[in-house]
Image: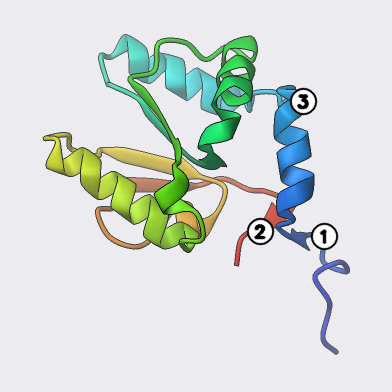
């Protein structure tokens, strides 16, 4: 018997619903992720936040990060107009490659979608976080 995505507890990503949710700037931090973030900052790592969110969501995203406890990141990278329509794996790979071309080495990467972690210019270590809400095919 085949199960539908709704029967196993996840839905395909809906961009309109997601954009409305982002505008609320109310997403809580995952405690383990925030703890790791702060520990890495204390160890002197430069943290880059790479998201599939669009550039027009920068203010809401930055406010949400600050209100949930994130501080002093090196750079918040969002999709610009030339990134729109690119598959997530392609977009993430290109942005990671740009960081490597600037001389950075990517030691670790975490994300709630496999497209956050795959492709090229990948981290030495990657960590897939659970996301029971949606997936990006």
Tell me which numbered mark, 1 or 3, is placed earlier along the sequence.
1
Mark 2, Cα crowd under 10 Å, few <14 / some 14-19 / many 20+, is some
Is residue 75 visible in this depiction of the protein? yes
Q: Is residue 116 left or right of residue 108?
A: right
Residue 25 location in percent, x, y?
71, 23
- Residue drawn at the location 77% of the way across and 35% of the way down: 21
Check disc 2 and report the residue beneath it: 135
Q: Mark 1 points at which residue?
A: 9
In this rendered view, identify the residue nearer to me: 37 or 103.
103
Q: Disc 1 to disc 3, how far (Cα)?
A: 24 Å
Residue identifier under label 3: 24
Q: What element carries label 2?
A: strand
Q: Position of residue 19 (x, y in %)?
A: 71, 40
At horizontal 30% and vertical 53% (from top left) the residue drawn is 94
Instruction: Identify which residue, 135 or 2, lies in the foreground.
Output: 135
Alpha carbon separation for disc pair 1 and 2: 11 Å
Residue 24 horizontal/vertical position (percent)? 77, 25
At 51% across and 19% down in the image, what residue appears? 35
């Amino acid at each position: 018997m085949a199960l539908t995505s709704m029967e196993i507890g996840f839905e395909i990503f809906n961009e309109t619903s997601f954009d409305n949710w982002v505008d609320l700037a109310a997403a809580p931090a995952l405690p383990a992720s925030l703890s790791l973030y702060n520990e890495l900052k204390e160890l002197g790592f430069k943290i880059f936040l790479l998201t599939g969110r669009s550039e027009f969501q920068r203010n809401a995203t930055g406010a949400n990060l600050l209100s949930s406890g994130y501080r002093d990141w090196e750079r918040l990278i969002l999709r610009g107009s030339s990134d729109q329509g690119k598959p997530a794996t392609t977009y993430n790979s290109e942005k990671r490659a740009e960081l490597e071309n600037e001389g950075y080495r990517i030691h670790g990467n975490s994300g709630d979608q496999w497209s956050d972690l795959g492709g090229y210019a990948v981290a030495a270590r990657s960590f897939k976080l659970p996301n029971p809400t949606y997936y990006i095919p």
